[in-house]
Amino acid sequence: MLWIIDGNNLIHSDSILRDRMKESGLDSAVDLLCDELAKVALSGHRFQLVLDSGQGRRGSSAVEVLIAPHGKSADELILSLVRSDASQEKIQVVTDDLKDIAKRAPGGRIQRCSCGEFRSKVISGNTKSGGGPGRPSKSEKPPAPRSKNQIDYWMDQFSG
């Protein structure tokens, strides 16, 4: 199945990705999302992650990262991808943006999935660790600090 993801919409609505963006920036949140999608892709899913702006980003064979061209929005690029897809493959568009994408996308094999549903059913549902993506299971150590502010905080707590 092909998933076309409104990347900025997902990052801003998902608490794990939003926290990463606040701590370390948008690029870091995109990298985390790409890592999570690559793990899920092992079960046969393909992903097109569409972003409003930015530089070229790394992807993989199962995660294609697309940047909307200057003067165009991610919503417009998503609609273009959906309309130009000639395969008969089922397509899920991941977005919470009903007025711009979901209402304008053609029906039939194109379906909408909310960002919350996507996290719970696709990303979290396919993780094998007990804590979900971005969170340690009980047997793992916690993740390393991801920002200078976190490092400074812990250095302050344990120095002296």
Image: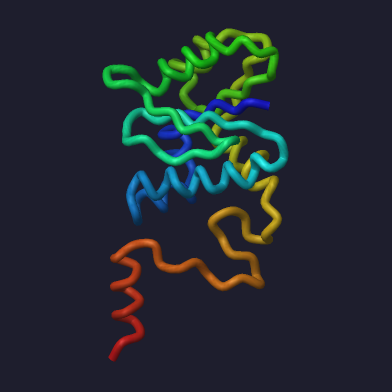
Measuring from the top left, give residue 103's x and y in whole percent: 52, 12
Q: What colouring style does the render use?
A: rainbow
Q: Is residue 31 left or right of residue 71?
A: right
Measuring from the top left, give residue 104's x and y in whole percent: 50, 10
Quarter of the picture containing the N terminus is top right
Residue ID at (53%, 9%) = 83
Towards the viewer: 99 or 26: 26
Instruction: Give the total of numbered labels.
Output: 0
Q: Is residue 35 above or below residue 159?
A: above
Q: Is residue 20 above or below residue 60?
A: below
Image quadrant of residue 26?
A: top left
Residue at the front extreme of this rendering: 61
Residue ID at (41%, 34%) = 8
Q: Is residue 152 left or right of residue 78?
A: left
Residue ID at (34%, 54%) = 24
Residue at the bottom extreme of this rendering: 160
Measuring from the top left, give residue 5's x and y in whole percent: 52, 29
Measuring from the top left, give residue 16's x and y in whole percent: 49, 50
Q: Is residue 149 left or right of residue 105?
A: left
Quarter of the picture containing the C terminus is bottom left
Residue ID at (56%, 47%) = 36
Q: Is residue 17 above or below residue 87?
A: below
